Image (cartoon, rainbow, N blue to C red):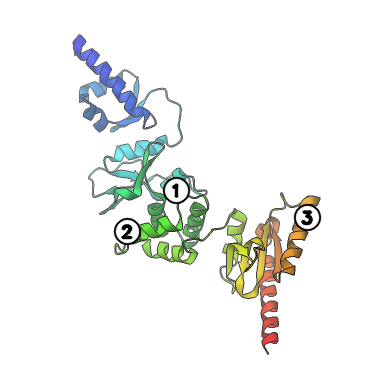
Amino acid sequence: MHISVFQYVSCMRLEAELRNFAANQLGHVSRAQALALGLTSHEVGRLVASARWTAVTPRVLKVAGLPPLRGDRLVAAVLDQGSGAVLSHTSAAWLWGLGGFSPTEIVLTRLGSSRHRTPLARVHEVRSLPGRWLTLRDGIPVVRPELMMMQLCATLPRGRAERALDNAWRDRMLSGASLIGFLNDHAASGRNGIALLRELTEARGDRSTPPASNLEARVKFLFMGTPLRFVPQADLGDDAWTGRVDFYERSMSLVLEVQSEKYHSSLLDAEHDARRRRDLEDAGFTVIEVTDVELFAAPESLVARVVATYWQLERARRARRA
């Protein structure tokens, strides 16, 4: 079919607008967006036939020749699902930069039901999706970290969800105040995951500081089934600040320091650690130092050693009382 010069110029102008639009979506547009700009279905078909655009799916186009970009599969999935879809759950965790998550399986959430289901992602349909807890990151519609954490609490094992919360808190993706605001917004919603998220938030408190490293998180996990109740990143001292330690067991004044052999094996490091330990012991604390090698290669013996020290301190305390 022949087209007039006017139609050709109009199509080229609209294609330029379409490319500007795609620049904000990692080079992608949906057919619905192209039609909304004024292109016809035939003109969209000609763009694909011209090889200037590639059909990622029947509903999504991509500027031809672009190299693979971080998150481009996620953009394609959101656009293919259609209006109202946002990245969520583990996919949102990856996009926000949480360790331990990958974009292999794409997960979306959309408001209401749809007859169309994209083959690119798993889709959760919900009755409520407040705009306050949605945003854009790298041009991709995504749930905010607070809503993401509720979704992870609903779908992941407790330990993994708790670890994700600590990491998100540590990396300042969220805070105690932002979580409390989210929980207040969803106080009566009964949504899956809300009860666990509330429990974890209350356990940490508004000013809680989660574990500052993977090593400390590993220690926290190992001692979950013991009588020890460690507080991470604790500031010691009442009238005067004694120092900040990795983990602190208040009932026994027991300090657990987690050290990486990579950074604590030199002579200067050893001298600094010894001086720090003497200062803590002079202030009345019992100090146990563990290394990353023990933590991962011999966790059973490490836990047994720390628990034995705990019970030794408990017996001494009971003897003093008697």
Return the mark for residue 185. Answer: 2
Left or right: residue 294 versus residue 216 is right
Q: Position of residue 31 (x, y in %)?
A: 26, 30
Q: Position of residue 259 (x, y in %)?
A: 69, 56
Q: Position of residue 96 (x, y in %)?
A: 45, 45
What residue lies at 23% left-to-right and 27% top-to-bottom? 37
Q: Nearer the viewer, mark 3 or mark 1?
A: 3
Task: Find the distance from the CA under tag 3 to the CA under tag 2.
Answer: 50 Å
What residue lies at 68% left-to-right and 82% top-to-bottom? 317
Q: Which residue is mark 3?
A: 270
Return the mark for residue 93. Answer: 1
Task: Find the distance from the CA under tag 3 to the CA under tag 1.
Answer: 38 Å
In the rendered view of the protein, which quadrant contains the N terminus? top left
Left or right: residue 231 versus residue 204 is right
**Image quadrant in which you'd find residue 81:** top left
Tell me the amino acid under the disc marked 1: Ala
Q: How many marks?
A: 3
